[in-house]
Image (spheres, helix red, strand yellow):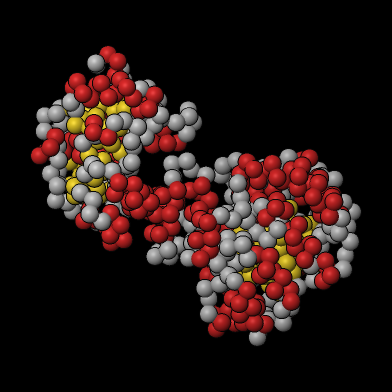
Amino acid sequence: MKFLDCTLRDGGYYNAWDFSAELIEDYLQTMQAISADYVELGFRSLKIDGFKGACAYTTDSFIQSLNVPVGLKLGVMINASELVRHEQSMNTELKRLFAPAISSPITLVRIACHVYEFEQALPASLWLKEQGYEVGFNLMQVADRSPEEIRALAMLATAYPLDVLYFADSMGSMNTGKTLEVIQAFRTVWAGELGIHMHDNMGLALANSVAAVQAGVTWVDGTLTGMGRGPGNAKTEYLVLELESSRQAPCNITALLKVIRKHFKPLQAHYGWGSNPYYYLAGKYAIHPSYIQEMLADSRYSDEDILAVIEHLKTENSNQFNLNTLNTARHFYKAEPVGSWRPLDLIQGREVLILGTGPGVKAHGLALENFIRQRKPFVIALNTQKALADGLIDIRAACHPVRLLADCEEHARLRHPLATPVSMLPADVREALGDKPLLDFGLSVKADTFEFHDHYALLPTSLVIAYALAIATSGKAKCIFLAGFDGYGEDDPRNQEMNRLFKCYADQAQSLAIASITPTRYQIPESSVYALI
């Protein structure tokens, strides 16, 4: 069998393939120490938009600048999508990327290929073989293909001079049984070398890889600490231990652990790859791991947001990542808005105080309580905010289905009526809220829009602050005070999102005057609760 480590290629999704020269050279020495058969140093890409580090292009000149151990075989990967969709012919583009193998430090070229690109991309193997390279094809997203479809793909491959045909568990959704089923389907037609690349969404990458070797797979991929897109891959440090008897090659585990401790554990602490419940669910429902990776890297997404997006994506065709799909999935109210409660009946002509969940409410709690007792505003607390005396709050507002489900027991204990789009909530949320007094104010999400109606509103986002602003405005309040909207760190994208929201609201003809009466980082007018009592 052959073991291939692709840490720098797959791991580059986290740091734009920008690894230091020291890390790369320490890594290469370690790969020789564990007798890796091949090291895939990175991509060889045609794309030049945006900054990416050297391992996104892995040029011959870059490799020649490194201290590569003698005898260590190096490889690169190309995305088939860059070849088959390019304006020039595939061979023309390959000539731009590769010199003849005799003058290159590269031994192996692997082509990552979706099923729908496979037939069109396979001829690239002819040109690469003519140049003297070993050639592999990595078929992605085969887990949801039938045995008949897999056999048809294998039959296509038999007409070309591939050194190895790989399949990747792209969604991290395969278990051992499914892995063996896919292998069997390939083996009914494909008699050549067969490889496997396992993702670790469900913690099964190692078990699947070992089972594949026992079933006759002869090429296996791993990465140090599993570093790779989303939850990562089968871990090299575990694979070389598990497969030691199969490989029958020297393996200096001390050197391996040293380079992990020096370089890769700090990177993992920074970027946070590795499986977690979100990746597990993504694997279970065949959702592309990039959806989870993007949400985890974006502080605007709460736990409730991520779970709600997963709930949405599992009913969609989500095995290919699309940022627009992600942005749409975050907002849950797309149907025609429905409601039955009229805020005007409680709010008309009154000042409104909206209590956020920031620390400013507790820090200035006594002053806020005096403000409420003296000026008697209509007080809307967001979600389960309870830093102030219970009797000073008129209603609560919540609209996030997953947050509501998580907070339903707390809401049941709180005596205040809850304003929420009751008629539009999933049945399980309505049931969980039980006998709670509910004020049914509907909402629908439409980009860059605030519209205020008697029983519902159109909003640019399903954030609860937008919902509370709509309640106050539909209720024809006199003005709106905010407390507990402290904001986030200077570069936190949640600040930008909230600033856009407040500006969008202020631009509406029906908008009301807003002022934060506790400290805020948002770009909104400020006053002081102490000046108002």
The answer to whether residue 507 is left or right of residue 264 is left
The answer to whether residue 166 is left or right of residue 30 is left
Residue at 61 percent across and 62 percent down: it is 203
The one nearer the camera, 469 or 362, is 362
Residue at 32 percent across and 27 percent down: it is 483
Looking at this rendering, what residue extends furthest in the top direction?
531
Q: Quadrant of residue 205?
A: bottom right
Which quarter of the rendered picture does the C terminus lie within?
Answer: top left
Residue 112 rendering spot, x and y as whole percentages:
62, 63
The one nearer the camera, 432 or 360, is 432
Looking at this rendering, what residue extends furthest in the bottom direction?
188
Residue 392 rendering spot, x and y as whole percentages:
23, 31
Q: Is residue 212 above or below residue 249?
A: below
Residue at 44 percent across and 45 percent down: it is 301
* Residue 511 appearing in the image: no
Q: Quadrant of residue 345?
A: top left
Q: Is residue 528 above or below residue 493?
A: above
Which quarter of the rendered picture does the N terminus lie within?
Answer: bottom right
Residue 327 rendering spot, x and y as whole percentages:
40, 49
